[in-house]
Image (tube, rainbow, N blue to C red):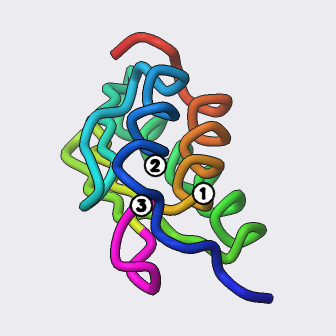
C-alpha cells in the first residue's frame, strides 16, 4: 500500500486546529500528557502501540515516570502526512483530554 505524501504547509495549518492538544509543524507533531501513575503511563503506551501496529505507523514515545512525550512524523514522507493526523486523532481518543 502506498504511503501518503508529506502535507504542504497550508494543508498542515488547516488540519492543526482540529488537534488542539498537538503542536509542531512540518517536522513533526508533538503532544505531552501526564497520567496519574507510572502504570497508567505504561498502559497508555500499550494502547498506543496496539493502534500503531494496526496502522503500521509508529510514534516516537518518551516515558518519564508518568509523563509521555509523543512525536508523530512520517519519516518515509520527510515530514507530517495524513497518517500522522490520523494517528494523532486516534491517540486523542485514548488519552485524557487535559494537557
- Image height of 96 relative to 59, above or below: above
Q: Which residue is mark 3?
A: 80
Q: Nearer the viewer, mark 1 or mark 2?
A: 1
Image quarter where the N terminus lies is: bottom right
- Does label 2 or label 3 sit earlier along the sequence? 2
Q: Nearer the viewer, residue 95 or 27?
A: 27
Where, by quadrant of the figure, is residue 41 drawn?
top left
Q: Which residue is mark 1?
A: 82
Where, by quadrant of the figure, is residue 23 drawn?
top left
Secondary element type, mark 1: helix
Range drawn in magenta = 74-80
Q: Residues within 10 Å of mark 2 (few under 14, many from 20)?
A: some
Q: Whole-Å distance between the Cαs marked 2 and 3?
A: 26 Å
Q: Which residue is mark 2?
A: 42
Inspect the magenta stretch and tell me whether residue 85 lies in it.
Answer: no
Q: Whole-Å distance between the Cαs marked 1 and 2?
A: 26 Å
- Does label 1 or label 2 sit earlier along the sequence? 2
Image coordinates for residue 85, horizontal then vertical, percent: 56, 47
Amino acid at each position: 500500500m502506498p504511503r501518503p505524501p508529506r502535507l504542504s504547509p497550508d494543508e498542515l495549518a488547516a488540519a492543526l486546529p482540529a488537534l488542539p492538544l498537538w503542536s509542531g509543524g512540518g517536522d513533526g507533531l508533538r503532544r505531552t500528557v501526564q497520567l496519574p501513575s507510572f502504570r497508567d503511563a505504561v498502559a497508555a503506551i500499550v494502547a498506543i502501540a496496539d493502534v500503531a501496529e494496526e496502522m503500521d505507523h509508529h510514534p516516537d514515545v518518551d516515558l518519564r515516570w508518568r509523563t509521555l512525550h509523543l512525536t508523530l512524523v512520517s519519516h518515509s514522507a520527510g515530514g507530517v502526512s495524513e497518517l500522522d493526523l490520523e494517528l494523532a486523532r486516534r491517540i486523542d481518543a485514548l488519552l485524557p483530554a487535559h494537557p
